[in-house]
Image (cartoon, coloured by chain):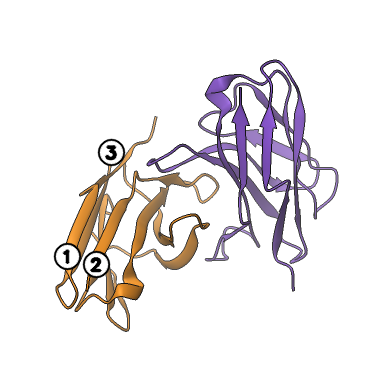
Chain colours: A purple, B orange
Amino acid sequence: NAGVTQTPKFRILKIGQSMTLQCTQDMNHNYMYWYRQDPGMGLKLIYYSVGAGITDKGEVPNGYNVSRSTTEDFPLRLELAAPSQTSVYFCASRVDTAGNTIYFGEGSWLTVV
Amino acid sequence: GQQVMQIPQYQHVQEGEDFTTYCNSSTTLSNIQWYKQRPGGHPVFLIQLVKSGEVKKQKRLTFQFGEAKKNSSLHITATQTTDVGTYFCAGTRTGNQFYFGTGTSLTVIP
């Protein structure tokens, strides 16, 4: 049981470059989330999805885009990377609002230089 | 926007001492969750509290949800070195968006 899988684990981007962080879950969860965590800080919600075809903004959506074409996949797109986007990114999933546990991926460390 | 504050930011304890972290929300929450994150790791779900005044225990960990559903606490009795990590609370009003606190980093000195 793989759970929530994120790729890549580490990436260095140049300012202005674009990239996609991939997230896949094999638990048939409806809810999926993208968080970012800056050093020594808590997690900030970027985007979330309550099901295939449905996405919504979180606290810090600027500079990011998401899509949810399938239940399993929830990619996060950075269009024009900026140094302020240097962070650790976590994808997470949950079966629905009745489900207690949110399962996190292992994180993607992104540095923008 | 909704804010979830957590104190203290850091706590150093001798092994065997107790530890408590507190979480306070600017708004009434529908439920609150607690997570543990080891250095370099990802958050791991510990528990969810839903009812006003609810108290739940997991071995040496005691979780409490305030009567007004705006604050919560996590208490660890007789800390062990395996308790090292950062403890986060995360609250929600709707069940969709969880707002994380800034976390309390626990260091246990053997």
Distance from Cα at disc 2 to Cα at disc 3: 30 Å
Distance from Cα at disc 2 to Cα at disc 1: 5 Å
Residue that numbered label 3 is attached to: B26
Neighbourhood count class around disc 2 (C-alpha, 10 Å): few under 14, some 14–19, many 20 upward: some
Q: Give the residue at x 80% y 55%.
A: A72
- Tell me, yes or no, whether the two marked residues, 2 and 1, touch with CB atoms within 8 Å: yes
Q: Position of residue B27 (x, y in %)?
A: 31, 40
Q: Chain of mark 2?
A: B
> Secondary structure under badge 2?
strand
> Secondary structure under badge 3?
loop
As drawn, which residue projects farthest toward the bottom? Answer: B59
For badge 3, the amino acid type reads Ser
> Secondary structure under badge 1?
strand
Disc number for residue B13: 1
Residue that numbered label 2 is attached to: B108
For badge 2, the amino acid type reads Val
For badge 1, the amino acid type reads Val
- Residue B91 falls left or right of residue B108: right
Disc number for residue B52: none
- Residue A34 falls left or right of residue A100: right
Seen in the picture, residue A53 relative to B11 is either above or below; the reply is above
Of mark 1 and mark 3, the one earlier in the sequence is 1
Evaluate whether residue B67 shows in this view.
no
User: Looking at the image, which is closer to me, B5 or B97?
Assistant: B5
Of mark 2 and mark 1, the one earlier in the sequence is 1
